[in-house]
Image: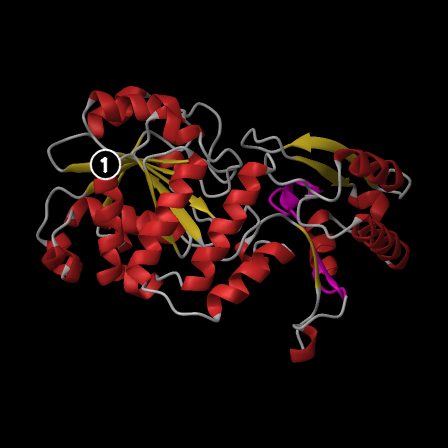
Amino acid sequence: MDNIYKQYGLSPVINADGRMTALGVSTISDDVAAVMKEAAQNYVVIDDLYRTVGARLAEVLHCEDVCPTESASAGIALAVASLICGNDIAKVKTLTQTAAKTSKREVILLRGQNIDFGAPIQLMIETGGGKVVEAGFSNGSTASDVENAINENTLALFFVKSHHCVQKNMLGPEEMIAIAKKNNLPIIVDASAEEDLERYYKMGATFVCYSGAKAVSGCTSGFVECQTHEYAEAMRLQYKGIGRVMKIGKENCMGLLAAVTAYQKNGGYKPIVSTDDLKAFNEKIAKIPGLSASIIQDEAGRQIFRSKITVKKEEYGIDAVELNKRLHEENPKIYLRDHMAKQGSLAVDPRPLASVKDLDEILEVLKRIHEGR
């Protein structure tokens, strides 16, 4: 697994965790890399590029307009800031002061969605000048919870679609969008890792923030689908303000366009390692004392299927938390999905795997750790 990172003393990684920012998110195709190389080696007027890429993405995604961003989280901050500043360049350039003296900046977020996905989502909203107001409870929310939180200072509603969020007893995106429409308020949807790039826009969301590197498997980038050209223009204006510290470069703009175009044309990303490969892997896992495995679907309901490996400490020798730690100490480092480690299980996400050989290596390491205890 020699690669450029190893030349600098960094350990190679087998990523069976998922499209995780902490692991570099995704790997890009040769076609996207070629586009980025050509774009990086030429000059362009950046403001024109942002509008042109946004218009081309809008054609591909069947929406009104799109604003390319450095990441999905940048899109969140820029969307909030654009609602506060509109097309007023003076406000854009003095966002901190503008937000401090603006009362209408409350962003309503379900309490069960106020998550930390590697960084707090509340911080992204506050970076854009917003003030988070939580609605509902950690284990449930209702339409009344949200409507009771709406007042004259409400700037927007916010909805997070993520496996990190509480899933049970929570309002869905359709319900939140309906509440926003009923109260004539914009709504921002964080759909960073979602695979359907048109769903939430079609539901009527004002802004939909996506990662260009996660489901799309493109370069480090993001994009925001906007219901109107005016919203997109206000967001692009933010590159004269806070957007400058989170700007997307020309090569990543063009890489994003190439990746999204290919993704939509091909009907989504097709993993190299299939569910059938996972089933065969699970059968082999079951032969290791103390381990069992089953196929599970993504917690947030996406059509992503993973191998859940359950660890019985009494038979395997160590628990799932310690096993996860040992895997990180391997060379190459092995990263499995560890959200449920304290509950006794790890999971293998096939999407980032380079080949079935990665599954074979994971299997051999699991055997060796058990035998060595």
Give the residue at x 61% y 30%. Answer: 303
Residue 100 point in image, percent of width and height = 12, 55
Nearest to the observer: residue 349 or residue 310 = 349
Which range of residues does the magenta coloring cover? 328-348
Residue 129 visible in the displayed image = yes
Residue corresponding to mark 1: 156
Nearest to the observer: residue 134 or residue 278 = 278
Instruction: Specify few, some or many for label 1: CA neighbours under 10 Å numbering under 14, 14-19, or 20 or more.
Output: many
- Left or right: where does residue 354 sit relative to residue 118? right
The quadrant in which the N terminus is found is bottom right
Residue found at the far bottom of this picture: 8
Give the residue at x 75% y 34%. Answer: 275
Residue 171 visible in the displayed image = no
Give the residue at x 29% y 59%. Answer: 47
Residue 62 point in image, percent of width and height = 41, 32
- Left or right: where does residue 100 sit relative to residue 47? left
Vertical comparison of 26 with 8: above or below: above
Vertical comparison of 202 with 51: above or below: above
Residue 68 in magenta?
A: no
